[in-house]
Amino acid sequence: MRRIFLPWAASALFLLGRVMASEEKELGEALQLQIINFNFETVKVTWNASEYSGTNLTFLLKLSGNEAYRPCSKYTLQQGYTAGCLLEVEKDAVLHFSIRNGTQPLLSKSLWISNYLKPRSLSDLSFQWHQGAVTVTCSDLWYKGLVYEIQHKSTFDTEWQSKEAKTCNVTLDSLDAEKCYFFRARVKTLESSYGSDTYPSDWSEVIHQQRGKLTDLCRENSLFPNFILVAGMVTFLIASLLLLPLWKLRRVKKVLMPSVPDPRFTFSGLFESHQGNFQEWIKDTQNVAHLNKMEDGEQESIPEEAAVVQLAEMSVTAVTSPVYRQTEEEEVTGEPGQLPRQPPQDGEVVSLGDFTFVTSDNSYVRF
C-alpha cells in the first residue's frame, strides 16, 4: 500500500508545483519591474502593481544562495504605498528576491545585478589643445567593458558630433581654436559584456572652451545679430530698387504733364460768382476798380491787391505795332526775344493787373 501511495504523491506534488508556478507567473506578469544598478553601489528595484493599488507589497531579498531572505530595509513609496526597494551593494552579485502580497508570493527571481548596470557620470574632464585638435581625458572607472563617448559642437553647429573610445582618452580633430565649443561626455556599457538591459550614464556637465581656455558661456546665437544686419541691408536695397523707378516715373510725368496753375486763386470771383464765365466776370469787374481822387487833390495810394481794368477799342494795327517795333529792335540789337503773339482781329484789349487779354465774342487770349 505504501509503494502504491508514493508514486501518486510524487505526481501530486509535481502537479501542485506546476500549478503554483503558473499562478506565480500570472501574478508576476501583473507586476512591471524596473531594475537599475547604479555603478555597483546601489540597486533600485521598482514595480508598478496596477492590480494591487492601495496595497503595501513586501520585498524579500538575499545576495547569496546561503543566506536567508530578509525584508527590504529602505522602501520607496508612491502615494503612500510601497513601490520599490533600495539596497546597497559593493560588487557584482546574484540578487534573489521575492515580492509578496502578505504571505502570497507574486513574483520571485534571481538575476545578476550587472545586467542592469548604469555607470556614474563623468565629472573630471580635462582638455589639451594642440594644432587644431583637442584631447579629452578623464579617470577611467574601475570596471571594464565600457565605452567612453565624447561629444562636441561649436556655435555654428546644430547637432552634436560624437567620438568613442574604450578608455577616457579621446582626441577630436579638425577643430578651430578661435571658435567656442561645447563639450560633454558619458559612459556606455558593451553589450557583449553586460547584455542589452543596461543604461548609459548621465551626460556630464557641458563645458565651454575657446582659444584653449575654459570660458563661462558660449553665445549660441552669435550669428543672430549678423543675420539681422544682413537681412536689414538686403531689405533696404530691395526697397530702394522698388522706389527708384517710382521716383523716376514721377519726374517723367512732371516733365510730360506739368501742373497747370489754378485760375481760381488769380481771378477772384471767376468761379465762385460766375461759374467760370469770363465774359460775365469781365463785365462785373469793370465797375470794381476805380481811381479815386482825394478832395485835397492828392491821390490815395492804390493797394497792390486791387486790379485795374482798362477797356479800349483798338485796331489790329494799333495793338500789334508796338510789339512788332520791339521785335525789330531786338533783331537789330541781336538780343534774343520771344516771338510775338498774334492777337485776334476786331477784339477788345483788357488789362487786369499784370495780365493783358484780347477778348472776342466767344473766346479770349492772354498775351
Image (tube, rainbow, N blue to C red):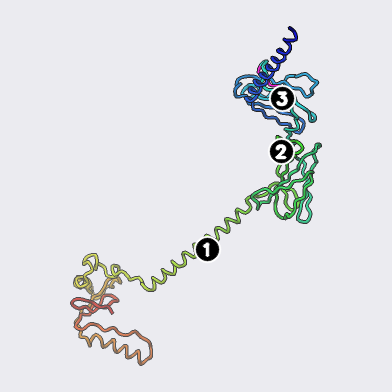
Q: At which x and y percent is residue 154?
A: 68, 51
* Circle 3: element type: strand
Quadrant housing residue 341: bottom left
Disc 1: CA contacts within 10 A as few (<14), some (14-19) or many (>=20):
few
Q: Which mark is residue 91?
A: none
Q: For the magenta stretch, what is the residue range?
A: 97-101
Which amino acid, mark 1? Leu
Compared to residue 291, the image places residue 191 above or below, namely above
Would residue 125 be visible to someone looking at this image? yes
Q: Nearer the viewer, residue 317 or 247?
A: 247
Q: Nearer the viewer, residue 243 or 108?
A: 108
Q: Which mark is residue 237?
A: 1
Q: Earlier in the sequence, mark 1 or mark 2?
A: 2
Which amino acid, mark 2? Pro
Q: Is residue 332 magenta?
A: no
* Circle 2: element type: loop
Q: Which mark is residue 200?
A: 2
> At x 67% / y 27%, what residue is drawn?
46
Q: CA distance from mark 2 to mark 3?
A: 24 Å
> Disc 2 vs disc 3: which is toward the camera?
3
Residue contact at pointers 2 and 3, CB within 8 angstroms = no
Compared to residue 287, the image places residue 212 above or below, namely above
